[in-house]
Image (tube, rainbow, N blue to C red):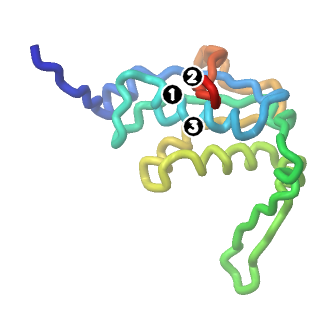
Amino acid sequence: MKKSTVSVRAQDAAENRVWYVMDAAGKPLGRLAVDAAVVLRGKNKATFTPHVDTGDHVIIINADKVVLTGGTKGKEEIRHHTGWPGGLKAIAREQELAKKPEEAIRRVVRGMIPHNRLGDEIIKKLKVYRGAEHPHTAQQPTVFEGGVQRRHKGE
């Protein structure tokens, strides 16, 4: 019997979307962002198709309680340009997390998904909130308990 590769259509993927809630309290920023990016992209599913948005919705709560690991990570400079002459702005990562934790998490997750039109659609399914409350109770989100399978050296 010949096996065939499953290629999911966009209509079929949109019908089977699930909402997940991730709690950022006490978790490292990078680990949280990897878990969110994998679920948003749909790589945790057997029906993953690279050119179709097969991922689920992700709600991240307690964004203000995310932690940075490593001594110099908080001092790392985040730069962006306003578009005006001389408009290069810079801020330390720990200051960005203190001022706008929602935008800091969204920026890190956006860096982990494709930088094209597909990525623009995927990032719209990410909702980040500073506190423990969110307005998406009608979608009946489930708590994301697992993480991405990580291999450590020596295993």
Mark 3: which secondary structure?
helix
Q: Residue at x 52, y 46 (%)?
A: 113
Badge number at residue 121: none
Q: Where, quadrant-wise, is the N terminus in this rendering?
A: top left
Query: As drawn, is 93 to the left or to the right of 38?
Result: right
Cβ–Cβ below 8 Å for labels 1 and 2? yes
Please rate how many residues cluster around mark 2, counting C-alpha atoms within 10 Å: few if below 14, some from 14 to 19, many from 20: many
Q: Residue at x 84, y 44 (%)?
A: 70
Looking at the picture, does residue 140 appear above or below residue 9? above
Nearer the observer: mark 1 or 3; the answer is 3
From this viewpoint, which residue is outermost toward the bottom? Answer: 85
From this viewpoint, which residue is outermost toward the left? Answer: 1
For disc 2, the marked residue is 19
Q: Amino acid at mark 3?
A: Ala
Please rate how many residues cluster around mark 3, counting C-alpha atoms within 10 Å: few if below 14, some from 14 to 19, many from 20: many
Q: Quadrant of residue 141?
A: top right
Q: Residue at x 73, y 48 (%)?
A: 103
Badge number at residue 56: 1
Q: Residue at x 60, y 27 (%)?
A: 150
Residue 26 on image: x %, y %: 84, 28
Residue 96 on image: x %, y %: 84, 53
Cβ–Cβ below 8 Å for labels 1 and 3? no
For disc 3, the marked residue is 37
Q: CA distance from mark 2 to mark 3?
A: 14 Å
Q: Where, quadrant-wise, is the C terminus in this rendering?
A: top right
